[in-house]
Image (cartoon, grey):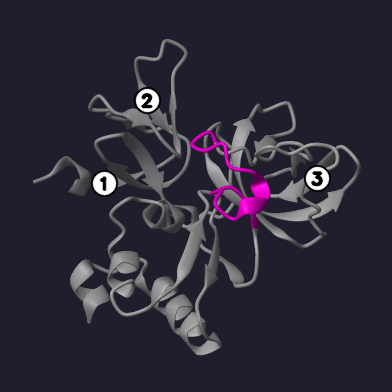
Amino acid sequence: VPLQLLIMALCLPGDEVPMTGAMPGMGVALDEDGQRAFATAAGVVRTSDEEVSVENLRKRYLPRKGDCVVGIVMSRNSEFYKVDIRSPSAAFLPCLSFNAATKRNRPQLEIGSLVYARVEEAHADLDTELTCIDPETKKCWNTGEVLLGELKNGLSFEVALSAAQRLVAVDCYVLDRLGKDFSYELCAGTNGRVWLVAPTARETVLLLQAIRRSFGMTNVQVEA
């Protein structure tokens, strides 16, 4: 059986979790020596080639450096935007943290705008810092060719964090299957917020319902 298909038993906070050489993921923490791992939440332990995590229906997101999230702009000033990323406290996004942004040429995000960003810094005692600088390209933020930045049009909805992990996976069956029959764009953040846009309102609603109902189903059930 492929390692990524193994699902272990239920666990409670404090239960020891076997790591099998993988990295600790969401809901799992290492001890002070870094030798043993323990669950920090109740749920099902899921093991993949890359990490071991605890899946449940929680929606409160705890920021981790390197995560990509979908946030909502709550307020702004001349230096940064305050962004809701479904975490215990709001994150901040510097106004110049966009590809090739300058004081004269930078995005002007309105309150309520959706933005796709990466967690630059995350500390328990400090505010979370976001960035929309895409390290994979040197294109300017306003060319439309940069992955990170403002998400325009479409709609957003929220899912459990475990469901978001499946949507951001490279081999997400439901998204690949829907792509055979529909033309759409989707951006899922590890914080459980999803942005979706399709050519028509009808297709957008159909896709939204199909994605939401797929969680907890097998690939055969999704196909049906």
Residues 52 and 186: in front is: 186
Rendering coords of residue 89 (x, y %): 74, 43
Judge left or right: residue 135 versus residue 96. Answer: left
Q: Residue 119: where, in percent of width, then height? A: 60, 36
Q: Residue at 40% of width from left, 57% of height from top? A: 167
Hey, which quadrant is residue 8 in on the image?
top left
x and y, in percent, of residue 43 in the image: 39, 49
Circle 1 SS class: strand
Residue 191 is tagged as: none
Residue corresponding to mark 2? 37
Q: Residue at x 40, y 29 (%)?
A: 38
Q: Give the image location of residue 26, x and y in percent.
A: 45, 39
* Left or right: 81, with 88 as reference point: right
Compared with residue 80, is residue 32 higher up or lower down, i.e. above or below? above
Residue that protrudes farthest toward the top in the picture: 33
Label 1 crowd (10 A; few <14 / some 14-19 / many >=20):
few
Q: Mark 1 or 3 closer to N-term?
A: 1
Residue type of the residue flagged with mark 3: Tyr
- Residue named by callout 3: 81
Mark 2 residue crowding within 10 angstroms, few (<14) / some (14–19) / many (20+): many
Between 120 and 134, which is closer to the camera in this rendering? 134
Q: Label 1, on which residue? A: 9
Q: Amino acid at mark 2?
A: Ala
Does the magenta portion include 141?
yes
Q: CA distance from mark 1 to mark 2?
A: 15 Å
- The residue lying at 86 percent from left, 48 percent from top is 76
Q: Residue at x 56, y 55 (%)?
A: 59
Left/right placement of residue 145 relative to residue 113 reads: left
Residues shaded magenta:
135-150
Q: Is residue 79 visible?
A: yes
